Image (cartoon, grey):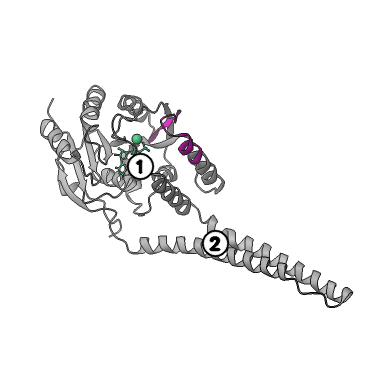
Amino acid sequence: MSMASSAERPELSIVVPVFNEAENLPLLAPRLIATLEPIVASFEVVFVDDGSADATLETIRALNAADPRLRAVALSRNFGKEIAIAAGLEHCRGQAAVIIDADLQHPPEMIARFVELWRQGYENVYGQRIDRSGDSALRRALTQRFYKLFESFGETHLPEGAGDFRLLDRKAIDALATMQERARFSKGLYAWIGFKSIGVPFDVAERAHGQSKFSYRKLTRFALDGLTSFSSLPLQVWTYVGFAISALAVLAALYFLLEYIIKGATTPGFATLIISVMMLSGVQLLSLGVLGSYIGRIFSEVKRRPLYVVGERIGLDASVERRRAPGA
Ligand code: UDP
Ligand code: MG
């Protein structure tokens, strides 16, 4: 079998966001190759080195030297998993792409099933994790709360347990490439683009080496990005809160007026005053904060910086990056 040169379009691309996974890549690569060789005519693996500080890049170079179907784009610094995925999708040339984590939590053997469903006409085949026992109880509880909240905000429906482990048809990849938003919440974007979709349940494996790159701080920011980029409800809700508080104020005014008419002047209500001042200023600050977070997002989007900066390409040429700056 001839190895696909970088000018050819492979049938399937595998996109792997990689951040400090030097120990995992030598385990992942042979499992991917063993899975892919029997099921597709040609393939490429596009590692996206997301600014790793360990031996990840050297490991990728060695893998590429041994097998040129293993390629990479190295970002100039750590941009985060969501951006790394976007970079990988922009650099891959397959008729479909599978996004998979580098830590072997997503079993590569599942790709065979994804490809089968793709050949049956599904364009967005997502793995649905049926077991989150690999995560801590706190993380699982918070994740669940987040999805409930996201669901109640309406607008975009996320299939349960669906994440980044999925196959996307070329049409879906191109659709995603048109969305150049910086605060990327991929799960929402995958759902937003639509296409014929189907879920495939899978068991999440244990991380092979190292530990999760997501701290609670990172997860919180990610969750806020998700909510604010898919809903403007946090902005609109203040209209209702403001309306309710104004209505209460009118009632209170009527009450005090009646009290004055019936009883005449009474002692001024210190407690009432303090409580209403504190409550109103609290509500105002909170709503200002929400406004601020949306304005911050508008600010970062209008700067129109590129999503990422490429440091180096391994086995890939710059011409593949053809869909940057849509409309430009
Ligand atoms: N990752 C990345 N950039 C980051 C953090 C993570 O490319 O800033 C990659 C990481 O190397 C792995 C995948 O994203 O391949 C999932 O990360 P991790 O396993 O840490 O997340 P978890 O499984 O805990 O959700
Ligand atoms: Mg993981």
Give the magenta part as a residue range: 124-142
Looking at this rendering, what residue extends furthest in the left direction? 65
Label 1 C-beta lies within 8 Å of the nearest ligand 1 atom: no
Q: Position of residue 80 (x, y in %)?
A: 31, 47
**Mark 2: which secondary structure?**
helix
- Can residue 115 be seen here? The reply is yes
Residue 170 coordinates in the image, percent (x, y): 31, 40
Q: Is residue 74 magenta?
A: no
Please report the residue visible at 58 percent of the width from the left and 58 percent of the height from the top: 237
Residue underneath mark 1: 172
Q: Are marks 1 and 2 in contact (CB under 8 Å)?
A: no
Q: Name which residue type carries label 1.
A: Ala
Residue 70's quadrant in the figure?
A: top left
Total labels drawn: 2
Q: Position of residue 116 (x, y in %)?
A: 34, 25
Residue 40 image offset from top left, x and y in percent:
25, 27
Quadrant of image for the C terminus: bottom left
Horizontal side of 282 relative to 310 (left or right) equals right
**Rendering quarter of residue 316:** top left
When asked about the image quadrant of residue 245, the answer is: bottom right
In the drawing, does residue 58 fall left or right of residue 273? left
Residue on which disc 2 sits: 286
Going by the picture, which residue comes out furthest to the right? 262
Query: CA gap, disc 1 to disc 2?
Result: 38 Å
Residue at (41% x, 40% y) in the render: 195
